[in-house]
Image (tube, rainbow, N blue to C red):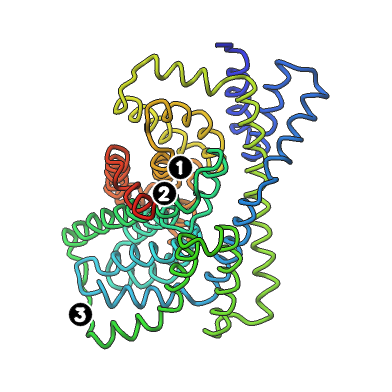
Amino acid sequence: MELLPVLVLILSFLVLLTMGVPVAWSIAISSLLTMLVSIPMWPALTTVSQRMGSGLDSFSLLAIPFFILAGQLMNKGGIANRLIAFAKTLVGSLPGGLALINIISAMLMGAIAGSAMASASAMGSILGPEMEREGYSREFGAAVNIASSTTGLIIPPSNILIVYSLASGGVSIAALFLAGYVPGILTGLLLMFVAYVWAKKKKYKVGTRSTIKQIFKTFIDAFPSLMLLVVVIGGIVAGIFTATEASAIAVLYTLILGFWYKEISTKDIPKILLDSCGTTAIVMLLIGASMSMSWVMSYENIPQNMSDLLLGVSENKIVILLIINLVLLLVGIFMDMTPAVLIFTPIFLPIITKLGIDPIQFGIVMILNLCVGLCTPPVGSVLFVGVGIANTTIEKVVRPLVPLFVAMIISLLLVTYFPGLSLWLPRLFDL
């Protein structure tokens, strides 16, 4: 194993990040510097730029801007309020009712919008002040909002699962979408258990029990929003349309829904499109730069060398999966989810393939790992959004976050060592 390319890649990337260089440019520049170890400057520049361009030349990637636009339309279209009202009638009378409402609403909103930050922003803005008025501590409310917002990255439709499909060389998006349901719901249930116990211990106020009529009314109000999941996932699984086509249908459906709810008008469309373009540009730059780094690593034979190194330590599935989980948890603390998936999938995929682990299961395990990183400093984007909306500090939120982290880790370990949790639904539909 040649150490020089590996050292140049790792050290240059870390130095650039430490200097405050944006992640996408840090990835691209460190890839270029690594290529300069092996070939002259102009061929290296040409190769890296070509790989950035060709990395974006994928029909599957077209789903990402459409799902981002659909998420923006949902966020502005009053969907969050209806989902919260529905969740409130279901669990509002339990201890920690508002915290449970936050988690259920975040699962539904995240699944529909496919964005953890959109979910954290919507739920924090609406439920945060209400939780505080009911006697919940601001820090506990923020912690619940931050942790629960990540469940939507596992429950489909999810942009990051599309990114993993691309990085893995074509794992079925439909299979990944189905594989995410049970782990996502399991994580949500574990978070709800922690919130229930914490609220009971702190003796937070309990809401009134809703009548069947109230539950039915809020369900009918939220039904059109919930139907998006049936339309998108049902259409993909039934083979009516691809994930990319489903994303375009999601945009059309949410646009019609926004006008139907009278929450969106024609004057709102330009800003929604502009916000979506800005988010898409950031994501696509990250994907292009990460694809160039993945190619450079392959050129320098880094994935194969890493595979030999890890398998030299042990060939026991349990040990290797534990090591990979620890590495990904560490990576998630310092790196955003999209580049982490694009960079580390080609490194770990040969290893898990040799061990006979299904790439679909590994995709869910990887995303669950990186979800924890979204809630931790120094680059935890969801953490910063949740703390900012709650108008508190990271130091104060850490204590109530710890038991929620434990719940997420338990879910991760269950999905890691019990493949059926993620593979049951894809196998049921023969995917």
Q: Nearer the viewer, residue 68 or 263?
A: 68
Label at residue 377: 1
**Cα–Cα gap, marks 1 and 2:** 8 Å
Q: Which of 418 and 259 is in front in this view?
A: 418
Residue pushed farthest bottom?
A: 213
Q: Say whether disc 1 or disc 2 marks the residue closer to the N-terminus.
A: 1
Amino acid type assigned to the residue bearing label 2 in the image: Ile
Q: Nearer the viewer, mark 3 or mark 2?
A: 3
Q: Is residue 376 visible?
A: no
Image vertical order of residue 214 relative to residue 21, above or below? below
**Cα–Cα gap, marks 3 and 1:** 38 Å
Q: Which of 40 and 102 is in front in this view?
A: 40
**Cα–Cα gap, marks 3 and 2:** 34 Å
Residue under the image location 58 percent in, 79 percent down: 256
Residue 291 horizontal side relative to residue 241, left or right: right
Q: Quadrant of residue 108?
A: bottom left
Residue 275's x, y, as percent? 65, 63
Q: Quadrant of the N terminus?
A: top right
Residue 49's x, y, as percent? 76, 35
Question: In the structure shown, which secondary structural element does the residue marked by tag 2 occupy?
Answer: helix
Residue under the image location 28 percent in, 55 percent down: 191
Q: Nearer the viewer, residue 209 or 395?
A: 209
Mark 3, Cα crowd under 10 Å, few <14 / some 14-19 / many 20+, is some
Residue under the image location 31 percent in, 41 percent down: 419
Q: On the image, numbered disc 2 is attached to which residue?
A: 394
Amino acid type assigned to the residue bearing label 1 in the image: Pro
Question: In the structure shown, which secondary structural element does the residue marked by tag 3 occupy?
Answer: loop
Q: Say whether disc 3 or disc 1 marks the residue closer to the N-terminus.
A: 3
- Determine whether label 1 and label 2 are within 8 Å by CB: yes
Q: Nearer the viewer, mark 3 or mark 1?
A: 3
Amino acid type assigned to the residue bearing label 3 in the image: Arg
Residue pushed farthest right?
A: 42
